[in-house]
Amino acid sequence: MHRIARLSGLLALVACTATPTIVENTATEVAVRYDGIVNKIDDAKQMAQRACAAKDKIAKLRKVDDQGLGQHFGYFDCISPSGLP
């Protein structure tokens, strides 16, 4: 019975954290939190690409930080498509 309750709680937590979220968005970088279960780094990169595109730039993955269940972060640099500033 306790196992079912824990599993239900975990599923509820995952449902709440499933959507990648931008936690930092500057002219030069974007940081995206994702759960690592439902969404992966590719989902975070899509979100970063949209944020950088609003600045006429593209997202380039700089670092991944895995902090445990539901706490993964992708750090992206927003660079010009030509690679020049």
Image (tube, helix red, strand yellow):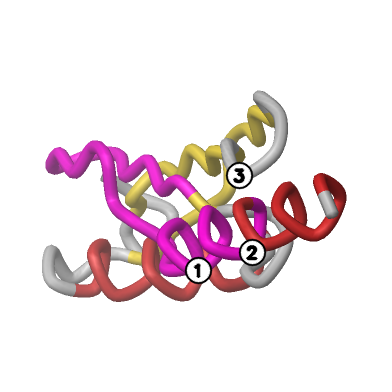
Q: Please tell me whether residue 68 belongs to the stretch shown in magenta.
A: no
- Where's residue 23, x and y in %? 27, 40
The residue range painted magenta reads 10-33
Helix, strand or loop for disc 3: loop
> In this figure, which residue is indicated by the disc labeled 1?
15
- What's under tag 1, amino acid-wise? Ala
Gap between marks 1 and 3, in whole Å? 10 Å
Task: Indicate the secondary structure of the residue bearing disc 1.
Answer: helix
Q: Residue at x 26, y 62 (%)?
A: 52
Q: Nearer the viewer, residue 33 or 82?
A: 33
Residue at (33, 50) in percent of width and height: 78
In terms of secondary structure, where does tag 2 sit? Answer: helix
- Amino acid marked by disc 2: Leu
Quote the CA–CA distance across marks 2 and 3. 11 Å
**CB under 8 Å between callouts 2 and 3?**
no
**Badge 2 local density, few (<14 within 10 Å), some, or many (20+)?**
few
